Image (spheres, rainbow, N blue to C red):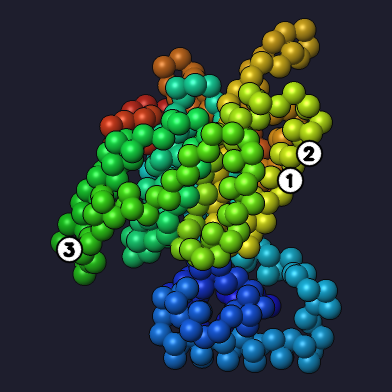
């Protein structure tokens, strides 16, 4: 039995899932004070939740439905868990639509494309949007931004943060005219303070940092997205032994998948492109080869179509192949001016 089936209010259920408590065992493994702190509830509420979880676990043990193998799930619970997963908006509704609502937590999403297409812009946008408060439909989390190329621009992050706060205030103003609405207390400075930035200058630093992330996120459970910009850079520059590179990258990809599942967060890997010789011609392809393409849950390819930027769902176990146009503005990602004509299903 999963946490979403506990007889608690929908708001507390959402808080549990957002904080990474998706199973009964994850709830039972912590103290009531830790649960209260992580989920942002009172200790009395946390105690009642743990009591319900223990009762449900005991009931499952008696009727034999609880798995004998630790960690096993049934497909019905997995389906409902998938439907309830939080997503991070990209601020481009057309792009969100083909992504099923945004970048999914508990998944590893690879986004690749040519230089200048907007990969870093998307990374910065996600690091801001993950902080949108829950009452505004966001996750209210923090972001880890791992910069391998030196392409992160704090001035650009401030621009997007200012636009995000303005959008929330505009929404609040609209809601005040029709309904009771929450005040916007978040400031651009608060958003920048919640982007945890790491600059790595070699593949050894990158490996060491990835190995440390589990401990770091355990101590900072409000982290809801990890962005690597880019996953490729040091492994294209410094490696001569391709077999060793493949092994190292495979281990790193496995760690990212474990992080996404364990902490119910999104991992976003930004990737470069390279040339690939296929059927007698050279074509552009995402870097790191075919074996790397199996290391992510979802793969999104960014490309130009004339003067329009497009995103294409190249691989996903749950999303259909589709493309949508987007544009990069001074306020961040937005719908293309001709998006109504441009969104197309493949």
Q: Is residue 94 left or right of residue 256?
A: left
Are the residues flagged by discs 1 and 2 in contact, CB closer than 8 Å? yes
- Name above or below for residue 260 compared with residue 322: below
- Distance of label 1 from label 2 (alpha carbons): 6 Å
Which residue lies under the disc numbered 3? 176
Numbered-mark total = 3
Position in image of residue 147 (x %, y %): 49, 37
Q: Residue at x 74, y 86 (%)?
A: 60
Q: Residue at x 82, y 86 (%)?
A: 64
Which residue lies under the disc numbered 1? 251
Q: Please tell me which residue lies in front, 246 or 94.
A: 246
Pick the quarter of the image with the N terminus.
Answer: bottom right
* Dot 1: element: helix
Q: Please tell me which residue lies in front, 178 or 284.
A: 284
Position in image of residue 56 (x %, y %): 66, 87
Position in image of residue 274 (x %, y %): 64, 19
Crowd around label 1: few <14 · some 14–19 · many ≥20 (10 Å): few
């Amino acid at each position: 039995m999963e946490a979403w089936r506990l007889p608690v209010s929908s708001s507390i259920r959402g808080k549990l899932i957002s904080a990474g408590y998706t199973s009964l065992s994850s709830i039972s493994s912590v103290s009531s004070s830790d649960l209260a702190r992580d989920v942002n509830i009172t200790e009395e509420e946390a105690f009642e939740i743990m009591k319900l979880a223990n009762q449900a676990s005991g009931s499952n043990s008696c009727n034999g439905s609880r798995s004998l193998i630790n960690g096993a799930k049934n497909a019905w619970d997995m389906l409902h868990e998938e439907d309830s997963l939080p997503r991070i908006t990209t601020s481009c509704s057309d792009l969100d639509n083909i992504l099923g609502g945004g970048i999914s937590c508990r998944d590893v999403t690879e986004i690749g494309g040519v230089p200048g297409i907007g990969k870093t812009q998307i990374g910065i946008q996600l690091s801001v949007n993950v902080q949108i408060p829950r009452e505004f439909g966001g996750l209210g989390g923090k972001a880890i931004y791992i910069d391998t190329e030196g392409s992160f621009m704090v001035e650009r992050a401030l621009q997007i943060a200012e636009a995000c706060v303005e959008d929330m205030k505009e929404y609040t103003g609209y809601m005040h005219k029709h309904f009771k609405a929450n005040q916007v207390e978040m400031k651009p400075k608060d958003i920048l303070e919640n982007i945890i930035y790491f600059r790595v200058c070699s593949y050894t630093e990158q490996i060491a940092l990835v190995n440390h992330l589990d401990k770091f996120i355990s101590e900072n459970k409000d982290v809801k997205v990890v962005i690597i910009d880019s996953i490729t850079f040091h492994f294209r520059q410094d490696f001569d032994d391709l077999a060793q590179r493949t092994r190292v990258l495979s281990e790193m990809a496995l760690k990212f998948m474990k992080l996404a599942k364990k902490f119910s967060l999104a991992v976003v890997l930004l990737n470069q492109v390279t040339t690939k010789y296929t059927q007698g011609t050279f074509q552009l392809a995402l870097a790191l080869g075919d074996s790397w393409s199996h290391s992510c849950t979802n793969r999104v390819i960014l490309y130009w179509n004339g003067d329009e930027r497009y995103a294409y769902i190249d691989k996903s176990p749950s999303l259909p192949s589709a493309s949508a146009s987007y544009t990069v503005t001074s306020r961040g990602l937005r719908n293309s001016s001709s998006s109504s004509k441009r969104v197309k299903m493949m």
